Image (spheres, rainbow, N blue to C red):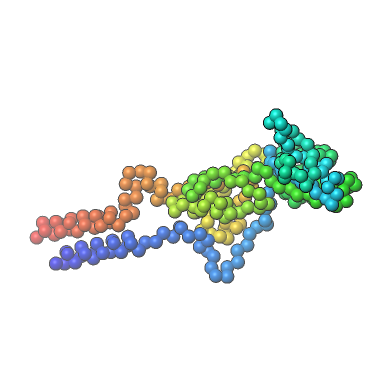
Amino acid sequence: MRIKFIGVLLLGTALFLGSCSTPKNISYFQDVQNGTIVTTEQQLDIKLKPEDKLTIMVSSSEPALAQQFNLVQVQNRLGSTTSTTKSTSSINSNGQMMSYEVNREGNINFPVLGTIHVAGLNRYQVAELITDKIKEGGMIKDPIVIVDFSNTGISILGEVSSPGRYEFNKSNLTIVDAIAMAGDLKMNGDRTEILVMRMDGNGVQQGYRINLLDMQQLANSPVYYLQQDDIIYVQPNAKAKRETTPNGNTPYTPSFWMSLTSFAITLVTLVLTFAK
C-alpha cells in the first residue's frame, strides 16, 4: 500500500513539474517595467560609403535654372537609355531620376558642380553641401535639394518569419525595426544571442551579439542603429538544435518523465519484493 502511494506521489510530481515549467527566454524586453526609462546612445544616421547610390533632385522657384542639376534617365526608341537633364516638373512623366554612385574615393560626379566628396556624410548633410555650393556659385538663389538612398539594404537570416534582403530609405533604422520588417522571430529563434555582422570602411567585418530580453543592454549596443549592408542572423535556440538529433528533446517531455517514474516504481517494487 505504501509503495503504491509513493508511486502515485512521484508520478504526480513529475507531471506537475512537466506541465508547470514556463520558458523564460521568449518575451522581449523583460527588464522594462511600468515607467522604466530606457536611454540609447546617440542616434546613428546612415553614413555614405563607396558603392552607395543616391538620387538627388534640385528644385527652385525658377525651374529653368534648376533643371540643369537634375540628371534623368530617358529611354529612346531603340530601347537603350541615355542621360540628360530635365525640368523637375516633367521627371515623373518622361524619365526616371538617375542614381549617383559613390566611387572608391568617396566622391560623386554632379552636374555643373563636378566632383563632390560625400563619403562619411548622411543624406541631409549631402543636401546641405550641394545647396551651399549652388548658392556660392550664384546659380540659384533659393535651391531646394532632396537626397534619397537608392540601394540601402540589410540582410536578415535565420529563425525569422521572412528571411531575405530588405531595402529601406530611412536615415536611421533600429534592430527592432529590422526584426519587424522580417515578420518577427520564430518561436525557435534564440532571442539572447542575435548576431549582427558589420563591414567597416576598411573592408573588415566585425560581429556583435545582442540580447532582445534586455532592453537597456540592447539600446547601448553599437548595432542598435543599423548601417547599410549589415547582416542579422538569428540562430536556432537549444530546443531547435536538439531536434536535429534523434530523441534530442525526449528528456524534456512529460512522457519521458512518466516513463522514468514508472520504471523507478517498478524497480523499487521488485527490490522490496525480493527483500522480503
Which residue lies at the image location 52% right of the left edge and 52% below the top edge? Answer: 183
Which residue ends up furthest to the right in the rendered image? 138
Is residue 47 visible from the viewing direction of this image? no
User: Which quarter of the figure is the C terminus placed in?
Assistant: bottom left
Q: Is residue 253 above or below residue 97?
A: below
Which residue lies at the image location 54% right of the left edge and 44% below the top edge? Answer: 164
Q: Is residue 269 left or right of residue 26?
A: left
Percent coordinates x, y for residue 122 in the rendering: 72, 49
Percent coordinates x, y for residue 104 in the rendering: 72, 36
Percent coordinates x, y for residue 60 in the rendering: 83, 50
Which residue lies at the image location 28% right of the left edge and 54% below the top edge? Answer: 256
Q: Nearer the viewer, residue 60 or 239?
A: 60
Which residue ends up furthest to the front in the rendered image? 77
Which residue lies at the image location 28% right of the left edge and 64% below the top edge? Answer: 13
Is residue 51 visible from the viewing direction of this image? yes
Which residue ends up furthest to the top in the rendered image? 78
How many badges with numbers are in the image? 0
Percent coordinates x, y for residue 231 in the rendering: 57, 44
Q: Is residue 114 left or right of residue 9?
A: right
Q: Is residue 176 left or right of residue 129?
A: left
Q: Nearer the viewer, residue 14 or 271?
A: 14
User: Which quarter of the figure is the N terminus placed in?
Assistant: bottom left
Which residue ends up furthest to the bottom in the rendered image? 35
Q: Is residue 67 left or right of residue 249?
A: right
Q: Nearer the viewer, residue 266 or 201?
A: 201
